Image (cartoon, grey):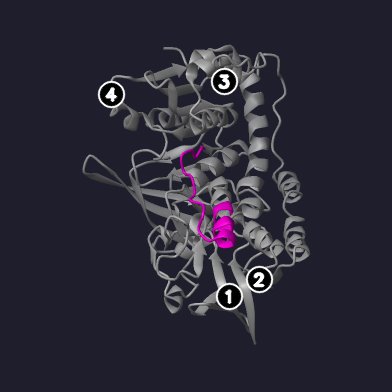
Amino acid sequence: MEKQYDLIVIGTGSAGAGVAIACSKEDWKVAIIDSRAYGGTCALRGCDPKKVLVGAAEIIDWNERMRGKGVQDQPTINWADLMAFKETFVEDIPPAHEQKLKDAGVETFHGFASFINEDTVQVGDDQLKGKHILIATGAKPAPLSIEGEQYLGNSDDFLSLEQLPSTIVFVGGGYISMEFAHIAVRAGAEVHIIHHGEQPLSHFDPDLVDELMKRSREVGIQFHLNTEIQAIKQTAEHQYSVQAVQKSNEQEKSVQIECGLVIHGAGRVPNIDKLGLDQANIDSEKQGITVNEYLQSTSNPRVYAAGDVAATKGLPLTPIAGMESQAVRANLLQHNVQIPNYKVMPSIVFTIPKLASVGMTVEEAQKLGDHIKINDMDTSSWYTYKRTNEKHARIKVIIDTQARRVLGAHILSGEADDLINHFATAIQFDLDIDEWKKTIYGYPTAMSDLSYFLEE
């Protein structure tokens, strides 16, 4: 049965649902489709539930740092109780999310969507024909093409573990591996990270990553760098042998780790392979669906794409998906009037301590000339961090001394997630350093250190 719509949205996460509701409120006939529970990755199986687990790990770390300094008893994590608490943040989202869409007049569908021509999508027995179509299907773990790949778990699996295995191997050195490793090790697991490069978190400041790795090793995380995973073999029920090769100085060394879980943290790719893009004349590339500056398909103008599935300048982050969603709704309703603004994209790794970045890197800034100043400060002895015995805290602030502007900031500390947002604001609105310094911040707080960060 064919049904006609003004707009069909594929995906109910940060990039899709808002567009569906906004267009429906303008009396468009709108349909939305998802093959999974309504709500998207961030709310159900990503950022939000992850940070609930991070909170418990931070309590463990805080107590450990303060032992002998007024704190005596060290708590432990009850994994089952923690997961039950995490579930309270997730369980109500799918029905509430779907009801919100229905209340806005959006017709909801469950199932896999695939194009059968340039304007028609098949979902189960239904054929949906749309004047416009938004693809917002996000990303999924990248295929690794290794023996035993079927034994790889992913972030969804980690966030739904009923019991924490005694030993866990994370494949890859990105956000997922590093964040989950810091949770798991503080919950009592033996943790290994296998990474093909010389350093994890390649998009962050290498000096700060080095410092984070020092702390990671102190708490028990074991790194296997310059190491390529070769195979995963099941040795018993819920028991695996991970086989890898470590390359160093043109020599190779075999690595074998026995564990109860192997988690894929080696990157994600656009979730487009089952959409039948060829049937709809939708061009794509490695980064995702090929779009113009208005997030419109370059080959099929009926189609737009937003979030991790679109090939744009944006980082694969929830706020970027949300920003692109706002642009798409404007471009649909007013015909291509808004170009997404990627000027500021703060990025945070919720390890313990946290690592955050916004704006230019040091390497980029140093190419601009002598008027660029890099304030590189070890802040571990500052009051803000000394009071909780945080021995790994550092900040780099990139200043244009002529334009009187901050160009970038890179922070490692327990306060990094909040601090980076202040720098994001300064960069977004080109705040004059001298004017910014006049702001009075509450004391003693992490932000009350600002004037020292901006010293020349």
The residue most toward the bottom is 1
Which of 443 and 26 lies nearest the eye of the viewer? 26
The residue type indicated by label 3 comes to Glu
Residue 196: image x %, image y %?
Answer: 35, 47
- Report whether 329 appears left or right of 410: right
Which numbered mark, 1 or 2, is in the foreground of this view?
1
- Report whether 153 appears left or right of 267: right
Q: Residues within 10 Å of mark 3 (few under 14, many from 20)?
A: many
Which numbered mark, 1 or 4, is in the foreground of this view?
1
Precedes in sequence: disc 2 or disc 3: 2
Task: Please tell me whether mark 3 sits on a helix, a strand or a loop.
Answer: loop
Which residue does the image show at 61% across and 54% down from the upper left?
14
Which residue does the image show at 76% across and 60% down from the upper left?
100
Measured Cα–Cα span from mark 1 to mark 2: 9 Å
Measured Cα–Cα span from mark 2 to mark 3: 50 Å
Please identify the quarter of the rendering in which residue 287 is found: bottom left
Task: Please tell me whether mark 2 sits on a helix, a strand or a loop.
Answer: strand
Residue 409: image x %, image y %?
Answer: 46, 28
Which residue does the image show at 67% across and 63% down from the upper left?
37
Precedes in sequence: disc 1 or disc 2: 2
Residue 158: image x %, image y %?
Answer: 60, 52
Precedes in sequence: disc 1 or disc 4: 1
Residue, disc 2: 31
Which of 1 and 153 lies nearest the eye of the viewer? 1
Residue, disc 3: 390
Task: Please tell me whether mark 1 sits on a helix, a strand or a loop.
Answer: strand
The dot on residue 130 is 1
The dot on residue 369 is 4
- Which residues make up the magenta segment? 326-346
Does residue 451 sit above or below 139 in this rendering?
above
Q: Mark 1 near mark 2, Cβ–Cβ under 8 Å?
A: yes
